[in-house]
């Protein structure tokens, strides 16, 4: 009889772990700041990959591997952030962070595709765009600290 009641309880516990968290303002700000910090790191890494690839100082297989790693890490950080339910007073923070994270993800993906296609003439422009986006992410991160 114990087994019969254990399975439904385990299923409820497992499914309840999938519900997005609703943190308080301080916790939300901390998580947002951490996410933005991670995003800055990945965007700056991709920026550097574009710059060093353009200068011929990075082997193509290394650049491709790093691009994939950074893209995956940015996607993971963004997903973890967007699964949170922002407190009502943080809706504007959520909207701004979500927009910047989306822009960063789009740029990183565009940089990966550009690298895969060996469109070297586009590397400097993408590096500048990545730098601007990283700066915007940093400013928001600093506001939340």
Image (cartoon, grey):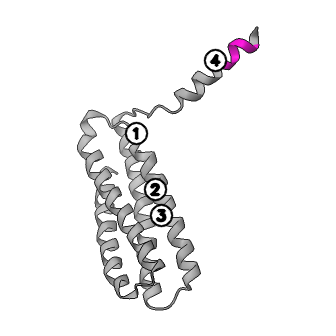
User: Does residue 5 show up magenta in the picture?
Assistant: yes
Asked which secondary structure carries label 2, the reply is helix
Quadrant in the picture for residue 100? bottom left
The residue most toward the bottom is 56
Quadrant in the picture for residue 61? bottom right
User: What residue appears at the point 31 percent right and 34 percent down from the top-left corner?
Assistant: 87
Asked which secondary structure carries label 4, the reply is helix
* Labelled pair 2, 3 in contact (Cβ < 8 Å): yes
* Labelled pair 4, 2 in contact (Cβ < 8 Å): no
User: What residue appears at the point 40 percent right and 68 percent down from the top-left corner?
Assistant: 108
Q: Where is mark 3, residue-wise?
A: 71
Q: Earlier in the sequence, mark 1 or mark 4?
A: 4
Q: Earlier in the sequence, mark 1 or mark 3?
A: 3
Q: Going by the image, does 129 lie left or right of 109?
A: left
Q: Where is mark 4, residue-wise?
A: 8
Residue 75: mark in rendering: 2
| Span highlighted in magenta in the image | 3-9
* Labelled pair 1, 4 in contact (Cβ < 8 Å): no
* C-alpha distance separating marks 4 and 3: 38 Å
Q: Position of residue 121 (x, y in %)?
A: 35, 88
Which of labels 1 and 2 is toward the front? Answer: 2
User: Does residue 15 show up magenta in the picture?
Assistant: no
Which of labels 1 and 4 is toward the front? Answer: 4
Q: Earlier in the sequence, mark 4 or mark 2?
A: 4
* C-alpha distance separating marks 2 and 3: 6 Å
Q: Earlier in the sequence, mark 1 or mark 2?
A: 2
Task: Count the numbered circles shown.
Answer: 4
Q: Where is mark 1, residue-wise?
A: 84
Q: Earlier in the sequence, mark 4 or mark 3?
A: 4
Assess disc 4: are there few (<14), some (14-19) or many (≥20) residues with their C-alpha within 10 Å of its C-alpha.
Answer: few
* Res. 117 visible in picture: yes
């Amino acid at each position: 009889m114990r087994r019969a009641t254990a399975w439904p309880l385990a299923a409820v516990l497992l499914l309840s772990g999938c519900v997005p968290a609703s943190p308080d303002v301080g916790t939300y700000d901390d998580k947002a700041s951490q996410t933005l910090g991670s995003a800055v790191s990945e965007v700056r890494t991709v920026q550097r990959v574009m710059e060093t690839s353009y200068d011929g100082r990075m082997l193509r297989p290394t650049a491709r591997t790093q691009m994939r790693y950074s893209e995956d890490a940015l996607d993971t950080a963004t997903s973890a952030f967007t699964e949170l339910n922002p407190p009502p007073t943080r809706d504007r923070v959520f909207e701004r962070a979500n927009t910047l994270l989306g822009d960063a993800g789009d740029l990183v993906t565009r940089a990966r595709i550009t690298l895969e296609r060996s469109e070297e003439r586009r590397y400097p422009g993408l590096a500048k765009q990545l730098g601007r986006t990283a700066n915007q992410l940093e400013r928001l991160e600093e506001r939340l600290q």
